[in-house]
Image (spheres, rainbow, N blue to C red):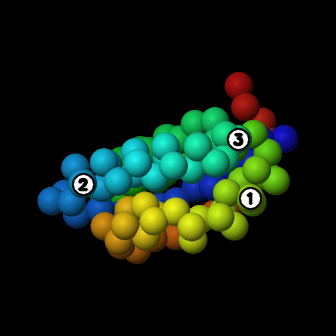
């Protein structure tokens, strides 16, 4: 069963371009060592916040990548541009 990690955070408009560049770099780095990352989706909500959902082939692959996250220098650099961040893990139950 596939798994997801969903984040919700804010990014100041003045930092958005830099955030997107750092996020792109982070995703590429994660995929190099953890090819189970199948897709990422960043959505700007009507209140200005963002949801960022990362889809994984399995919970095991997601867990391995999360455990390795401290070794990716892009992670803290990317998240430093966010505020009010929360993260939730889940598994896909139904997808159409």
In the picture, the disc for residue 64 is: 1
In the picture, the disc for residue 29 is: none
Q: Helix, strand or loop at disc 3?
A: loop
- The quadrant where residue 55 appears: top right
Q: CA distance from mark 2 to mark 3?
A: 26 Å
| Image position of 40 (left or right of 49) | right
In the picture, the disc for residue 36 is: 3
Give the answer, above or below, for where 48 lies relative to 34.
below
Q: Do the residues bearing badges 3 and 1 touch, measured as CB atoms within 8 Å? A: yes
Which residue appears at 67% of the width and 40% of the height? 35
In the picture, the disc for residue 18 is: 2
Local crowd size for mark 2, using a 10 Å CA cut-off: few (<14), some (14–19), many (≥20): few
N-terminal of the two: label 2 or label 1?
2
Which residue appears at 51% of the width and 49% of the height? 29
Q: Helix, strand or loop at disc 2?
A: helix
Q: Quadrant of the N terminus?
A: top right
Q: CA distance from mark 2 to mark 1?
A: 27 Å
Give the answer, above or below, for where 37 lies relative to 30.
above
Q: Quadrant of the C terminus?
A: top right
Number of labels in the image equals 3
Q: Do the residues bearing badges 2 and 1 touch, measured as CB atoms within 8 Å? A: no
Of residues 46 and 4, the one drawn nearer to the viewer in this rendering: 4
């Amino acid at each position: 069963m596939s798994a997801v990690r969903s984040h919700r955070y804010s990014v100041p408009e003045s930092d958005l371009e830099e955030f997107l560049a750092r996020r792109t770099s982070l995703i590429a780095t994660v995929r190099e060592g953890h090819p189970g990352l199948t897709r990422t989706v960043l959505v700007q909500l009507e209140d200005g916040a963002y949801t960022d959902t990362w889809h994984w082939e399995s919970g095991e692959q997601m867990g391995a990548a999360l455990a390795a996250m401290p070794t990716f220098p892009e992670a803290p650099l990317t998240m430093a541009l966010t505020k009010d961040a929360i993260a939730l893990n889940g598994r896909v139950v139904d997808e159409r």
